[in-house]
Image (cartoon, rainbow, N blue to C red):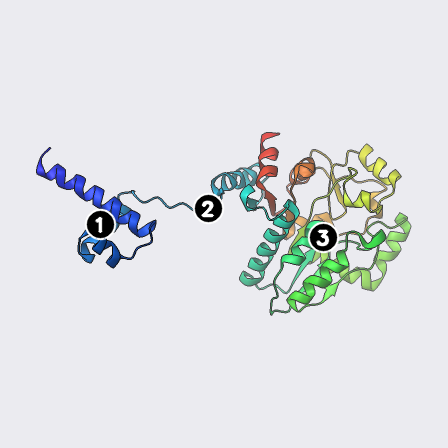
């Protein structure tokens, strides 16, 4: 080995040692210079040499690589513009909590970046979690219920969700004060003509940001557990192929909207307006996999926030 090669190896070794002391041991350059007996200027050059030659690898805690990969696959597969997949090791106690926190973060970003004065919100436990995680914002923004909000025993708590959010954003709360499903089609037509209801549903349809959870018709689904829909209604919807539900709109496994006598009684934002706004779904968990897939296939939605485990299952099970 000639002197030139030896000098290169010495430089390589010293640069790695200086970089390790700086990035890992957290010594400053004066301390490193004292530690290895070199000038501060030489230490500065050694650290730069290590960084420029790829000896320093940055590691950020959290498995973002897999999550980011799933985001791109889901965007391409379902033609959505936005996707956030929460890494498994970033779960906060449970999936609903994690999804709520991510939804609040998304909403805050939109409020800060865009000149919006209102947004719409659906029903469910995830929306309640979002409301809990949303910080106080000194900006007047109104929140609109995207569907009928009354439930037996107040289980879905849409109005509570909206009130909680409106308190945090110094805005007004617009809710119909009506059930999600009206008893008959004739009654629904009468209700929709009431000016107060009509104005709120127009707001729901035209708001530029809509945030929904994803539901279904299995026994664990909120609209089943809370008896918003009767057993007969659930049976008829299932017979017509309903799998996923978004804001009172039902989808079959191919992403087609279900239209029957039961859906004609629902008081909810019109699905024709979903793709005319930033409509984002927030949902996750193994029991939601089929439902999420069914609604995404409709290609009516702008984006999805979900967890890594759910994203992986959706992608693997074509």
State the residue at coordinates (61%, 56%): 104
In percent of width and height, residue 102 lies at 59, 51
In percent of width and height, residue 309 lies at 59, 37
Q: CA distance from mark 1 to mark 2?
A: 26 Å
Mark 3 or mark 1, whichever is nearer to me: 1
Q: Which mark is residue 46?
A: 1
Q: Are marks 3 and 2 in contact (CB under 8 Å)?
A: no
Mark 3 or mark 1: which comes first in sequence?
1
Residue positioned most to the left: 2
Q: Regarding mark 2 in the picture, which secondary structure is present there?
A: loop
Is the residue marked by circle 3 packed among few (<14), some (14-19), or many (20+) residues within 10 Å?
many
State the residue at coordinates (77%, 40%): 220
Q: Is residue 93 rendered to the left or right of residue 201?
A: left
The image quarter containing residue 263 is top right
Q: Which mark is residue 85?
A: none
Mark 3 or mark 2: which comes first in sequence?
2
Q: Which residue is mark 2?
A: 61
Whether residue 175 is visible: yes
293 above or below 165?
Answer: above
Q: Which mark is residue 122?
A: 3
Q: Which of the image's four quarters has the C terminus? A: top right
In percent of width and height, residue 253 lies at 71, 33
Q: Is residue 144 rendered to the left or right of residue 102?
A: right
Mark 1 or mark 2: which comes first in sequence?
1
């Amino acid at each position: 080995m000639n002197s030139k090669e030896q000098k290169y190896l010495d430089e390589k070794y010293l640069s790695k040692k200086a970089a390790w002391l700086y990035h890992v041991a957290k010594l400053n350059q004066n301390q490193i210079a004292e530690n290895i007996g070199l000038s501060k200027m030489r230490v500065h050059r050694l650290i730069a040499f290590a960084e420029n030659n790829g000896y320093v690898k940055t590691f950020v805690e959290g498995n973002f690589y897999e999550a980011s990969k799933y985001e791109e696959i889901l965007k391409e597969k379902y033609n959505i513009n936005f996707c956030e997949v929460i890494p498994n090791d970033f779960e906060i106690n449970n999936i609903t909590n994690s999804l709520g926190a991510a939804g609040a973060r998304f909403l805050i970003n939109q409020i800060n970046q865009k000149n919006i004065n209102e947004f719409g919100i659906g029903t469910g436990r995830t929306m309640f979690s979002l409301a809990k995680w949303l910080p106080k914002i000194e900006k007047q923004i109104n929140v609109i219920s995207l569907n009928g909000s009354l439930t037996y025993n107040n289980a879905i708590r849409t109005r509570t969700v909206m009130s909680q959010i409106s308190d945090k954003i110094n805005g007004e709360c617009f809710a119909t004060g009506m059930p999600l499903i009206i008893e008959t089609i004739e009654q629904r037509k009468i209700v929709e003509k009431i000016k107060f209801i009509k104005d709120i549903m127009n707001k729901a349809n035209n708001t530029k940001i809509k945030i929904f959870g994803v539901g279904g018709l299995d026994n664990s689904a909120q609209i089943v557990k809370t008896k918003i829909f009767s057993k007969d209604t659930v049976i008829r919807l299932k017979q017509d192929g309903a799998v996923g539900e978004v804001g009172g709109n039902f989808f079959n496994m191919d992403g087609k909207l279900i239209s029957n006598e039961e859906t004609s009684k629902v008081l909810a934002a019109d699905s024709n307006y979903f793709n005319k706004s930033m409509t984002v779904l927030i949902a996750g968990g193994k029991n939601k996999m089929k439902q999420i897939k069914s609604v995404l296939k409709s290609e009516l939605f702008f984006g999805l926030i979900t967890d890594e485990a759910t994203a992986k299952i959706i992608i693997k099970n074509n």
